Image: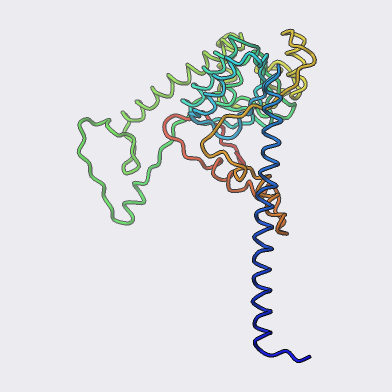
Amino acid sequence: MSINADDIIDRRRLRKKVSFWRILTFIILGIALLAMIAFGANKAGLSSAGKDHIARVSITGVITNDKPMLDLLEKLKDDEKVKAVVLNISSPGGSTVGGEAMYEAVRELAETKPVTTSVGTLAASAGYMIASASDHIVARRSSIVGSIGVLFQYADASELLDKIGVKVKSVKSSPLKAEPNPFNPASDEAVEMIDRVIRDSYQWFVDIVVERRDMPEFKVLQLADGSIFTGNQSLENGLIDAVGGEKVAVAWLKKEKGIDEKLKVVERKPKRPTDSIFDNPAAIAKFARIFGIEIGNSDAKALEDTLREHLPLDGLVSIWQGSGN
């Protein structure tokens, strides 16, 4: 049977329509599947949170003045189903103000129920400040702990401006207004002013460690030279209470604070305006695989990590700036 040109064209059009609807069907099914996964996980979390439990709060990445996290800590304080809290900290630190706000929130929480910290990769600078607010600190033997101190950085681009022939002039109400600035070398008076600010915040940080770790000031000052320590060294220096992971932290809650042995640890996350299943690297990876695209969770998370690592911070910072953090 011969097929004319019109029949061939009609068949091609039909194939295109069928292919379009197949692709659309796969997309809809993929979205529905991810929605079901997310709903199931959320339902399981809500179900667990509806019973007596130990809440796990993960504090990771660069510390900022994080209102959703502060709101979560406030909520846990009043949640009768939460019998204790485990802070899971893996942070190089961040803004001093953010660390201060979270430190105070953890202290308020600890006044109502036991709080312990399980350090992951590191709890440095403002990360350690927050850990010190808990009743008990546990870290892995190879975790990084410490970096007690405060940092203020500013750029001096004056030599570069001279080379390209640019001069920046300003009229100020007083010599120290907007100092130091990147357009001129910092004056001695400006350096002295910043030093006074640094020393005030540094002493406040030291006083926190003295109080929370019950150590004499001279010993804290010996440790508070910006040094970092392994978990094992931190135990010897009194900066933490035990070496181990979350199981050790939870065991302490049950043994020392009388928390029911049967209680499960339930992850509690802050509610953020941008929360969606597509903000989850694992969900993105699963969605891509539906269409035959292989992408690892680490690749899906690369942009998030890059933004987190290079997040600009204004003002004073308490952050460890080792390579890779």
Q: Is residue 300 left or right of residue 171?
A: right
Q: Residue furthest front?
A: 1
In the rendered image, is residue 284 in sight? Answer: yes
Image coordinates of residue 278 in percent, x first then y, are 61, 46
Task: Work out whether 260 lies above or below 168.
Answer: above
Measured from the top left, where is residue 293 in percent x and y? Answer: 70, 58
Q: Is residue 121 left or right of residue 74?
A: right
Q: Residue at x 69, y 42 (%)?
A: 36
How many discs appear?
0
The quarter of the picture where the N terminus appears is bottom right
Q: Is residue 238 visible?
A: no
In this view of the protein, which residue sits in the foreground, 139 or 246?
Answer: 246
Q: Quadrant of the C terminus?
A: top right
- Between 11 and 99, the residue placed more toward the observer is 11
Tell which of 92 and 74 is nearer to you: 74
Q: Report the side of 131 relative to 71 (left or right).
A: right
Can you tell which quarter of the image residue 280 is in?
top right
Corner quadrant of residue 54: top right
Point out residue 214 in the picture as x, y percentages from the top left corner: 61, 8
Up/down of 208 relative to 307, above or below: above
Is 267 drawn above or below residue 324 in the view shown?
above
Q: Which residue is at a point 53% across and 39% down the rendered structure image?
A: 274
Tell me if residue 275 comes above or below residue 51 in the rendering: below
| Color scheme of the displayed model | rainbow
Q: Nearer the viewer, residue 41 or 245?
A: 41
